[in-house]
Amino acid sequence: MKHFRFLTMAALIAFGSFTCAQNVITLDEMQAKKKQQQPQQQKVVKEKVSYSSASDDEAFGTLFLQYNPSNMHVSYNGYSGSTSMTGFSLGYLYSKPVSAPLYLEFGAAVQYFFKSEKYEDYYPDYDDYYYGYDEHHSHGGKSHDAKFSMLSVKIPINVMYSFEASDAIAIQPYAGIYGRVNILAQTKIGDQKANHFSKDDMGDDTWNRFQLGLHLGCKARFSQKFTAGIGYYMDLTKITDHTTIRGFDITLGLNL
């Protein structure tokens, strides 16, 4: 009996040792297999992050500052010319995906234009009354500082197409229309001021409060954080019967 019990215990010990050895081998195999799979998983995650760094299908907002070098184009009684002015805009644009990669953009911006130059009084002489004013003839008038300023609110509506140029850069061409609400506009020459929206000051040349225009351009979005771009705009409706505004939009923005 003792001999049988000894054989039974020996068999159990041998079986247990064999089972432990099997478990050790199995665990080692699992760890080796896990190590082989880890680089592949990391590669997949890395590719996903790189893809989403340039653009995605989610809506986003942009707080932007624009430099607007512009021209006021005048065509009146056979005369055609333009004068340059400087403008700046501060605004917000919301971009909503319609059907990727197409976005609908809308927002608003406060826009300020200004210009300063010298103005010379004109004193007619005897010949001018009979033969007409010769614009090339100098009459030695008194020189004044002429200052123009204009404050508006611009409301753009765009269609934008977004595609990836690299892992971190999305190129975004756009085109659309805008409405501009003109709030203030005045010219100051010496001590005199003229309100361009006043019938008393401007007569038949009183300016319009609302305009429509067309603009197009291209932006680049960097790592979903920053935007830079350039565009061109032009009024479709005139600010007076003979005056329109056109120019460029140079944009820097922060994506929110």
Image (cartoon, helix red, strand yellow):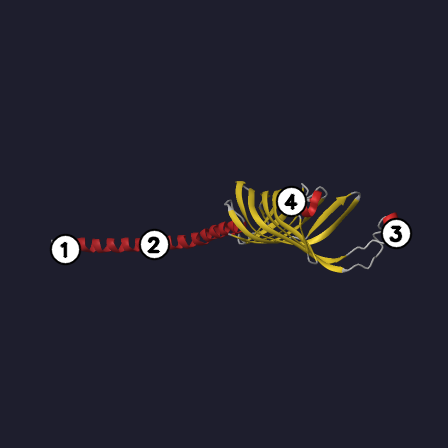
- Which residue does the numbered mark 1 point to in the structure image? 3
- Neighbor class of circle 2 (other Cα within 10 Å; few <14, some 14-19, many 20+) is few
Residue type pointed to by label 2: Leu
- Which is nearer the N-term, disc 3 or disc 4? 3
- What residue is drawn where x is 79% and y is 59%? 141
Q: Estimate the spatial distance between the alpha carbons at disc 3 and disc 4, rounded to whole Å.
A: 48 Å
Q: Are marks 1 and 2 in contact (CB under 8 Å)?
A: no
* Of 104 and 161, the residue lying toward us: 104
Q: Which mark is residue 27?
A: 2
* Of 1 and 115, the residue lying toward us: 115
- Which is nearer the N-term, disc 2 or disc 3? 2
Q: Estimate the spatial distance between the alpha carbons at disc 1 and disc 3, rounded to whole Å.
A: 147 Å
Say how many tags the image has. Answer: 4
Q: Nearer the viewer, mark 1 or mark 4?
A: 4
The secondary structure type at the circle numbered 1 is helix
Residue type pointed to by label 4: His
Q: Is residue 45 left or right of residue 140?
A: left
- Which is nearer the N-term, disc 2 or disc 4? 2
Where residue 40 appears, as percent x and y from the top left, is 46, 51
- Which is nearer the N-term, disc 1 or disc 3? 1
